[in-house]
Image: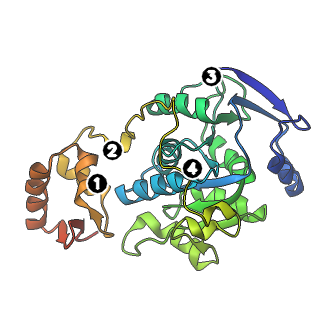
Amino acid sequence: MTRRGLEAGDERWPPGLADLDQLGGPSGVRSLWVEGELPALPGVAVVGSRQATVAGLEAARRIGADLGRRGVTVVSGFATGVDGAAHRGCLGAGGQTVAVLGCGLAVDYPRSHSRLRTEVSVRGAVVSEYTAWDAPRAWHFPHRNRIIAALSRAVVVVEAGEKSGALSTARWAADLGREVLAVPGSILGPAHQGSNRLLRDGARPYLDVSDLSDLFPECVTPPVSNRRRKGALPRDPDPRLVVGGGSHASRLLTLIEAEPVHRELVAQALSLDPAELAVLLGELELEGHVRSLPGGLVARARW
């Protein structure tokens, strides 16, 4: 895949990045490395926790897909969890996406996203301000969040704990005058504390794609097509949805919270058939860890 450098003032330089210069200090971006072709910008940033719940992953996938079907570019940070689900949802719906890395383009990080990266590069762009072999350092990620915000007209926070890095993207967006939205979540667990506080402090609630219609008129109309574009690569499963280490019971309890989710999502996450899941849920319900609800839903019984 061809990689090229862009500098401020180039014809293909994303216009939103110029807004960072108004913030002063080290906020500005002078050069950018691009793998693939930048799609239409500004887009919508979809961000959230790396340790997302099943419900959070499904919400991010659905938001990405809704935007992708309507031709709105999805921007995110390519991390595990919400970011990866948003990229996959967009690509699966035939859309285009931009992944902003916290390392150089020559670094395979996160390794679990290797196949996803190929598809992003083919159907959108992977970008970084860091030189080719720059390692993914902790401070790179909150710093790269300013680029995610600048490339977007709105930032949707799907699921964020009290100290989630996604809140950094929301702060950059507010400083840049971008719209900040958050998906409302349960108050009974830690997964939504940060995103719910954004709502308390004035962020707009995101309930469906029509909540972006004032910024993107195409979000008012139904999608043109639900078919995937020709040439799309098979999607690799998100690593959070693959059983790895520990029992199925402990894995299940890390994936669900007090907000109900459907049994089918849990079964897919644990690679269990319905009968096996029924036995597992029955045992956990007897122990008081989970509760079964009407409509095939299940939820944590306590925290």
* Residue 241 image label: 2
Q: Is residue 109 visible?
A: no
Inspect the image, locate mark 2, and give the three-letter code of the amino acid beneath it.
Leu
Q: Is residue 296 left or right of residue 62?
A: left
Q: State the residue at coordinates (63%, 50%).
A: 71
Do the residues under discs 1 and 2 have CB atoms within 8 angstroms? no
* Residue 68 image label: 4
Q: State the residue at coordinates (64%, 57%).
A: 168
Q: Is residue 203 visible?
A: yes
Task: Work out whether mark 4 precedes mark 3 in sequence or the reverse, and give the earlier one.
Answer: 4
Inspect the image, locate mark 4, and give the three-letter code of the amino acid beneath it.
Gly
Residue 155 drawn at (x, y percent): 64, 60
Inspect the image, locate mark 3, and give the three-letter code of the amino acid beneath it.
Ala
Task: Work out whether mark 4 precedes mark 2 in sequence or the reverse, and give the earlier one.
Answer: 4
Q: State the residue at coordinates (88%, 54%).
A: 24
Q: Determine the CA span between mark 4 and mark 3.
A: 27 Å
Give the residue at mark 1. 265
Q: Secondary structure at mark 2?
A: helix
What is the crowding at mark 4: few (fewer than 14 residues within 10 Å), some, or many (at least 20)? many
Q: Determine the CA span between mark 1 and mark 2.
A: 10 Å
